Amino acid sequence: MDLVDNSVDSARKLRGDTSLEGLSVSIQADEKQFSIEDNCGGIPVHHAKGYVFRMGRPGTAASTGGMIGQFGVGLKRALFKLGTDFIVDSTTDSTSFSVELDVTKWEKESDWGFDIRVRDSIKGSARGTTIVVANLYPDIALQFQDQSVIDDLRDDLTSRHRIAISNGLTINLNGSPLAGAPSEVAGGDLIQAATETFTIKTPEGGLVRVRVVAGVAPTQNDLDEDAEPEAVPFPASEAGWYVFGNGRLLLSAEKTRLTGWGGRRGVGLPLYHNQYARFRGFVFMDSNDSSTIPWNTMKTGVDQSDEVWVRTKQAMMSAGRQIITMLNLLKIERQAGVSGPLAPISTALSSSKMVAVATSEDAEYSISILELRADVVTAASYPAPNPELGEGVTRIAYTVDIRDFAVVSDALDEKRASRVGRLTFENYYTEVAD
C-alpha cells in the first residue's frame, strides 16, 4: 500500500485535479520477486537524497501538498520487510538515479548510507520509477504463492484507490488491471443527494476541505429490504459510508457508531438494517498538509478523537438523517403495496439515474419528495411503519421447514420470506379481527 501510495501521489502531483489517463502502475508479486513500475513522473535526485533515502523525515522537509505520504518511512519500510536485495531506479525530465542494495551486507557496515548513482536524464526517456525486490523472505514468498493473498491485495488496492482509478489511472496486478468502483448516487428532477462542502481550521492553523455526499443506490431486484442483514449479505456489504483522506479510502461501507449509526431513535442514524441497504454516503477530506487529515498512522482508518473527524461526523449524521427519513417513507409505500401517484418516492427513484458524487451540487435532500408524500395518504393500517418512526410495535421472527415454506410461497406467488410472513399474518389478523 505504501509503494502504491507513492505512485498515486506522483500521478496527482503530475496532473493535479485533471484526468490521470495514460498514467499507470504495474505490480508483479510472485515467489521469486516483487516489482512495481509506474510512469508517474519519477523522483528528483534532490528528493531522493534529502527525503526518500534518508532515515526518517527531516524537520525541514517541505509539505507534501495534498498527497498521502507523510512520515517518510513507507518506501524504506516496504523494501526492508519484503526481501534482502532491492533496486530503485527513477527518471524525471531532468534527472535520473538508481539505488541498489544487498541488505545482508549493508546491515554489517558501520556507515548505514545509501549509494545513489546519479546519471543525466536522456531526452525523451520515459519518466517514472521502477522498484524490484529480489531474494524475498521465505514467509513473503509463501504469501505471494497464495492466490487468496493476491486476491485480497487486489480488493484492497481497488477499494483504497477507487478515486484515482475512476479518474483514469491504470493499476495492474500480475498483468490484470483493477476494475474501478464507481462513486455514484441516484439523481433526477425529484431526487438529489444531500451534499455539504465546508472547511475546517485545525488548532495548528491547517485547513481541511470536507465534502459530504449522502444518497441512495439504485434498486436491486434480488434485495429483500425487509429481511435481516445476515439473510442478504451482499447488498448489505455495500451500504454505508465511504470515507477518503486525500483520495485514499480510509473507511469502506462503514455502518457502525464510528460513523454515527446506532444512535437513539430519531437522533443520528439508526441501527443498520437491510431497509437501508441502498444508503450510500461519501466523505472527502483533503488538505495540502497531510498531517491535518484525521487518519491513523497507517492510514487505514480515522482518529475518532480528532477535532476534524468529530466535526465531519456531525455533518455526516445531518446529511445521512435526510436519507434515512426518505428510506423510512419508502418502506411505508412498499408495505402499503401502492404505486404510481400514491407512491411518489418509489416513482421518483425508478425514474432517476446514477450521478457521480464528484459532480453533485451542494443541496439539502430534495424536499419535493417529502412535499409530495405529505399530500398523499399511503400509510397502511397494518403493518405499522418502521419502529424508528412509531412506538407500540413488535417484531415477529420464526423459522419453518423449507418444504412447507415453498408450498405457501408458491400459493402467494411471493419468494421473499419477510413478505410471506407479513401476508400470512395479515390474513390471520383479518380473520380474527372480523
Image (tube, grey):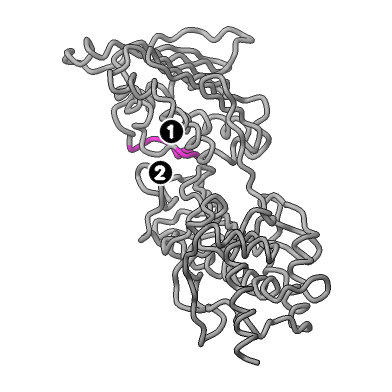
**Looking at the picture, how far across and down is residue 82, in whole percent?**
33, 22
**Label 1 SS:** loop
Q: Is residue 369 left or right of residue 13?
A: right
Does 289 sit above or below residue 33? below
Query: Which corner quadrant holds the N terminus?
Result: top left
User: Do the residues bearing badges 1 and 2 touch, measured as CB atoms within 8 Å?
Assistant: yes
Q: Which mark is residue 1?
A: 1
| Element type where label 2 sits in the image | loop
Q: Nearer the viewer, residue 16 or 324?
A: 324
Identity, as a three-letter code, of the amino acid under mark 1: Met
* Tag count: 2
Instruction: Please determine whether, in this image, residue 200 is positioned above or below residue 152.
Output: below
64 is within the stretch colored magenta: yes
Q: Which mark is residue 299?
A: 2
Q: Amino acid at mark 2?
A: Lys
Residue 260 or 395: which is nearer the viewer? Answer: 395
Which x, y percent locates residue 341? 83, 74
- Assign the magenta stretch its main secondary structure: loop
